Image (cartoon, rainbow, N blue to C red):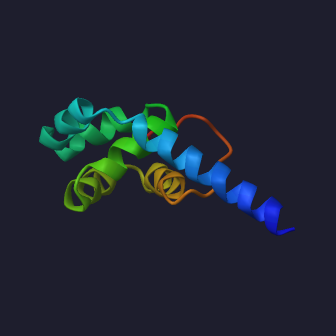
Amino acid sequence: KLEKKQTEYQEWVQRREDFLAKADESVVAIYSQMRPDAAAQQIAVMDEEAAAAILAKVTPRTASAILNEMDATAAAHLTNVMAGLPSETKKAPNPS
């Protein structure tokens, strides 16, 4: 039982590392400099893991401003992805 939990944990850590690697530093810098409303529109239609990885790497203040500009459902979905909770789709919900 302990070995099974250890394997699950190692798989989770690997998924998390892969997730964060999707947000290249130059892409993060670009989104950090964008207006929150413009960034929100683009992030809302991205692959959910890439979008969440970008939001996880920008400063909390920037992520908050971007999420604030998004539809509440889309923002909540991306927040769940960032928190490592399971999701049903591979794209963030549209902002409309």
- Image coordinates of residue 80 in percent, x first then y, are 53, 57
Residue 23 showing in the rendered view:
yes
The quadrant the N terminus occupies is bottom right
- Which of the two residues, 82 or 19, is positioned nearer the viewer here? 19
Asked if 59 appears above or below 35 in the picture, the reply is below
Check the image and name the residue furthest to the front: 3
Residue 57 drawn at (x, y percent): 30, 49
- Kindly identify the residue that appears in the image at 28 percent across and 59 percent down: 64
Is 46 on the left or on the right of 88, as rendered? Answer: left
Can you give x and y, in whole percent of width and height, for residue 66 in the image? 27, 50
Viewer-side residue, 63 vs 23: 23
Of 50 and 45, the residue lying toward us: 50
Residue at far right of view: 1
Q: Is residue 86 visible?
A: no
Q: Residue at x 30, y 42 (%)?
A: 40
On screen, residue 93 versus residue 71, left or right, reads right
Q: At 25% across and 49% down in the image, what residue appears?
A: 58
Question: Is 3 positioned to the left or the right of 82 in the image?
Answer: right
Q: Tell how many labels.
A: 0
Q: Nearer the viewer, residue 89 or 70?
A: 89
Question: In the figure, is residue 49 to the left or right of 36?
Answer: right
Query: Which quarter of the figure has residue 88?
Result: top right
Q: Quadrant of the C terminus?
A: top left
